[in-house]
Image (cartoon, rainbow, N blue to C red):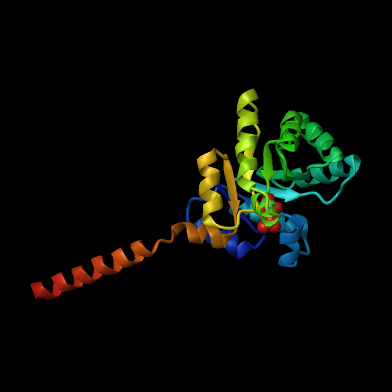
């Protein structure tokens, strides 16, 4: 399973990258707005320079011609950039065109398996089902991951399932159980994956016992 970080914050990306298990980055307009990105292309270029893996950068256009122009421009930023396109009619058309041009895409804002099926048929590199936002409206986000996995496996689609809108470690674990190819998470969730109180208690005891041993040897 690939781990992506879901942020536009360079410090967070560097911190996650230093862990050595980071495979990519996802950004969106809200994440860029959160940290006040003023030079979008320059900022994406910096992220692409930090991380070797795929970096998703989202178009803000919603009309086919404009999505194509904006997406080609984003694709020219770096070799590891992925054009993130919303799951709307013109977005699907644009994904088909990008796929024919060899431009990688991340189809975003997916909330149903039927949407995911269309995105795969258009040739999306990644499909981003938003788990947390479904949970927020009392719908089972994990069912969507399972449905997409089933549909994609039925027909052998190559589109990678990128579990998005992950809010806590159980979202990540369930996505892994269900066979999502990628999970994108905030830094906070990556940190939480490491945590277990018994690890902390166990380490404290190991170190204390070692100290006692050293004292007894003097
Ligand atoms: C990533 O590609 C998505 O844009 C992101 O995971 C959405 O997360 P949110 O629902 O927490 O905003």
Given the current orientation, which residue lies at the most extreme top position? 155
Given the current orientation, which residue lies at the most extreme front position? 138
> Is 131 left, or right, of 101 in this rendering?
left
Q: Position of residue 182 (x, y in %)?
A: 58, 43
Q: Position of residue 119 (x, y in %)?
A: 74, 35
Vertical side of 24 occupied by 160: above or below: above
Q: Quadrant of the image for the C terminus?
A: bottom left
Determine the residue positioned at 14% across, 70% down: 213
> Is 192 left, or right, of 200 in this rendering?
right
Determine the residue positioned at 56% across, 57% down: 168
180 or 58, which is in the foreground?
180
Determine the residue positioned at 74% across, 45% down: 84
Tell me if I can see residue 2 in this picture. no
The quadrant holding residue 145 is top right
Vertical side of 213 occupied by 129: above or below: above
Q: Position of residue 94 (x, y in %)?
A: 82, 37
* Ligand 1 positioned in quadrant: bottom right
The quadrant holding residue 207 is bottom left
């Amino acid at each position: 399973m690939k781990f992506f970080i879901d942020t536009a914050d360079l410090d967070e990306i560097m911190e996650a990258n230093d862990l050595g298990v980071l495979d990519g980055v996802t950004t969106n307009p809200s994440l860029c707005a959160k940290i006040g990105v003023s030079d979008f292309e320059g900022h994406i270029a910096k992220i692409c320079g930090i991380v070797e893996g795929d970096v998703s950068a989202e178009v803000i256009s919603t009309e086919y011609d404009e999505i194509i122009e904006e997406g080609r421009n984003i694709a020219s930023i770096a070799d590891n950039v992925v054009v993130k396109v919303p799951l709307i009619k013109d977005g699907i058309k644009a994904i088909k065109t990008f796929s024919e041009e060899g431009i990688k895409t991340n189809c975003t804002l997916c909330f149903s398996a039927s949407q995911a099926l269309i995105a795969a048929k258009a040739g999306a590199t990644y499909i981003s089902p938003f788990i947390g936002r479904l949970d927020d409206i009392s719908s089972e986000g994990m069912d969507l991951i399972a449905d997409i996995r089933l549909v994609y496996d039925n027909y052998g689609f190559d589109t990678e399932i990128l579990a998005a809108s992950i809010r806590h470690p159980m979202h990540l674990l369930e996505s892994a159980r269900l066979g999502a190819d990628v999970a994108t998470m905030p830094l906070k969730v990556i940190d939480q994956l490491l945590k277990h109180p018994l690890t902390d208690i166990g380490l404290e005891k190991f170190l204390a016992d070692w100290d006692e041993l050293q004292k007894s040897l003097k």
